[in-house]
Image: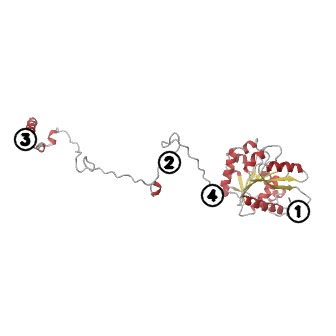
Amino acid sequence: MDRIQQAIEKARALREARATGGALPVQDVPEQDWRPAEHTPAPDPLDTEDPLRLGAPLVVAPAPAEDASDSPGRRAAPEPTRGSPLSGPHSAPRAPRFHIAKPELVWQKLTPFKPDRKQMHRNRIVTYDRTEEAHISYDIMRTRLLRALRKNNWTSVAITSPTANCGKTTTSINLAFSLAHQKDTRTVLMDIDLRCPQMANMLGLKESHSMAALLDGSGEIARNFVRYGDTLAIGTNELPSRYPAELLQNKAAAKALERMRGELKPDVIIYDIPPMSGNDDVIAFLPHVDCVLLVAAAESTTIDDVDRCERELGAQTNVLGVILNKCRYLPEQDTYY
């Protein structure tokens, strides 16, 4: 009854205030009196202790337009990648980045190799210990080769022959070991005669290396090369490969050779490639080399063979010259080649 009486008195006061134009006597009726006794009042949004109360000015400072790279301690927003929410349907995929270690570290990972002296002598590798005068001819060849490479800004040379049994592998190995004595020159020797590899047997290497695996991208450099000293890396083949011409002209082979050059940083690369007769392996591999040397065997290679090979090679790459091998009768003043 008291509440009803209060409501009647309040209504009467409101009518009198409207009639006289006076202020509404809201102070006379506290707000909490209108709430039930058992009801807990909710927090007043107009409470002055709330810093975000209604009616108070809310100041929002604009974010500075600064480059995250110019502000230390700030992390730049991630770039959109393919398949991420930030990439649209037409976003181009990011190009893969290959980490290439320092050449010194790559060379140190190669397995050290120390040839057997007797085997090297047996296979006529005379530049290994240079105890025979025949090494002088290869040293002269080395110097002329280095001069030609540096003059033309070249790196790679392929060594081939008109036919088999001309001594191209022997020449390649001797030239490589002669270059190994140049302490400021890194040399890479690779057996690219995939049909009939002979280099591993001549050097006495027993490891299961494969240049075919390296060229198709499935083999690693550290597992397919050995290191003689600090300046010569040798890559050989344990087994022959079938249909190597397709591999040699594959794009994967070009990428593998480029990666080899990037990791080993050689000054000279010697490729022992197959003979020119009987297959198309030489034609397939020539685009990867800067120049070529032709090895002819005395008393077996004909002049017509040399002329034919020189014309064919000259139409596709740079021919440095012809090496006459297995020549037993020379005047004392003449050189090996």
Residue 250 visible (yes or no): yes
- Judging by the rendered image, the residue that carries numbered circle 4 is 102
Residue 291 position within the rendered picture, expressed as x and y whole percent measured from the top left = 76, 53
Q: Amino acid under label 2?
A: Glu
* Residue at mark 4 to residue at mark 3: CA–CA distance: 97 Å
Indicate whether 180 appears above or below 314.
below
Q: Residue 20, which numbered label?
A: 3
Alpha-carbon span between mark 2 and mark 1: 67 Å
Residue 301 in view here = no
Quarter of the rendering occupied by the N terminus: top left
| Mark nearer the N terminus (2 vs 4) | 2
- Is label 1 or label 3 in front? 3
- The amino acid pointed to by label 3 is Thr
Question: Which quadrant of the structure image shows residue 248?
Answer: top right
Image point (76%, 61%), residue name: 147
Callout 3 environment at 10 Å: few (<14), some (14 to 19), or many (20+)?
A: few
Q: CA distance from mark 4 to mark 1?
A: 44 Å
Identity of the amino acid at label 4?
Lys
Q: Which numbered disc flags the more N-terminal residue, 1 or 3?
A: 3
Residue to which mark 2 is pinned: 79
